[in-house]
Amino acid sequence: MQLIPKTLIKSLILTAPIAFASTIAIAPSYAASIAGASGELILQDFSWAANPDSFEAITNTFTTAIAPAPGATAMADAVADASVKPEKVEQFSAALATGSGTDYFATGKGNSQTGIGFDPGCGCFQFNFKATLALLTVADPGEIAQAHSFVAFKVYKNDDPFTFVDYLKADLWSPTDFQLRLSDTNYINVSLLDQQDGFAQVEGTYRRKFDDGTGLTVRGFTNTEAVATVPAPPMFAVVILPVLTWLKRRAQMKTSPQEVSSRQAD
């Protein structure tokens, strides 16, 4: 499997405005929104020999699109893929959601998880990594478009598979909100290759000396989510206003007979 980050991201950026314009063309009097996110992780050049019996690749996607109002539209899509080889791990996920109208909800989620184990070795354990994150959010006033991209790797000791010893986590919460967290800069050397509106890419090297005979497992993660919807009306509009309207009508019904009788008396 050959993953090309720029191709994946360009396809998202190019197709999203087309889908957005289509919703406007279908329902020009309605507002519309679109959200998309993608994430990719590459791990390679491992210094220790990998155990092929320990390879793990899990992917899952989830989509929901609801448009009950007349003339409303909603669409969601998600993809995920992962490949684990002794010399290289590649994984990615992407999600897209769009809608138009006065009442709609669309969400897409794509997730991938990989695992690669290494037999007990000696000396420094080392590998190179690259993480790429992208997202796009466009919404008319009154609409909501949200997207999130998360890419990470964690290193575990095989004798304690539930507790990681080191990690790198990258989040792209909005086109301008990128966050990078490291467990320890002594073991992770990272460089920011590119960061611009809706895009971030980092690469670096993980290197740490472990005791002889230590077995290790490296796990990779990509989580992407996109949501497009019309915000729910406030509770006052949902509950209080209908009640007030009902009380007003009741009051009018009670006063109507009195008004009629008084006019007859005149």
Image (spheres, helix red, strand yellow):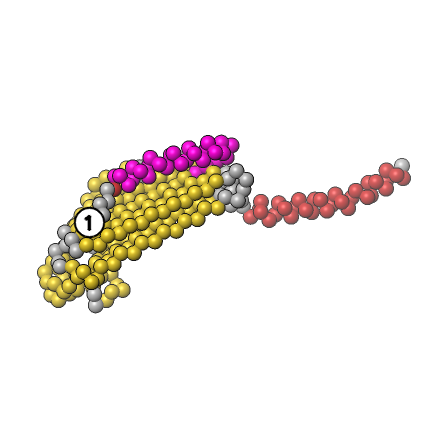
Residue at 51% across / 45% down in the picture?
232
Of 177 and 55, nearer the camera is: 55
In this view, the residue farthest toward the bottom is 159
In this view, the residue farthest toward the front is 1
**Residue 137 pos. (x, y %):** 38, 39
In the figure, is residue 245 to the left or right of 96? right
Which residue lies under the disc numbered 1?
A: 129
Residue at 13% across / 58% down in the picture?
48
Of 171 and 49, nearer the camera is: 49
**Residue 208 pos. (x, y %):** 14, 57
In the figure, is residue 100 to the left or right of 222? right
Of 168 and 29, nearer the camera is: 29
Q: Quadrant of the C terminus?
A: top right
Does residue 250 appear in this view? yes
Q: Quadrant of residue 177?
A: top left
Total residue callouts: 1
Provide the residue span drawn in magenta: 6-33
Q: Main secondary structure of the magenta part?
A: helix
**Residue 225 pos. (x, y %):** 37, 47
In the figure, is residue 127 to the left or right of 137? left
SS for tag 1? strand
Mark 1 crowd level (few <14, some 14–19, many ≥20, 10 Å Cα): many
In this view, the residue farthest toward the left is 123
Q: Is residue 153 magenta?
A: no
Image height check: is 147 above or below 117?
Answer: above
Residue at 51% across / 32% down in the picture?
29
Residue at 31% across / 49% down in the picture?
80
Does residue 174 appear in this view? no
Image height check: is 252 above or below 86?
Answer: above
Name the amino acid type tagged 1. Answer: Phe
**Residue 224 pos. (x, y %):** 34, 48
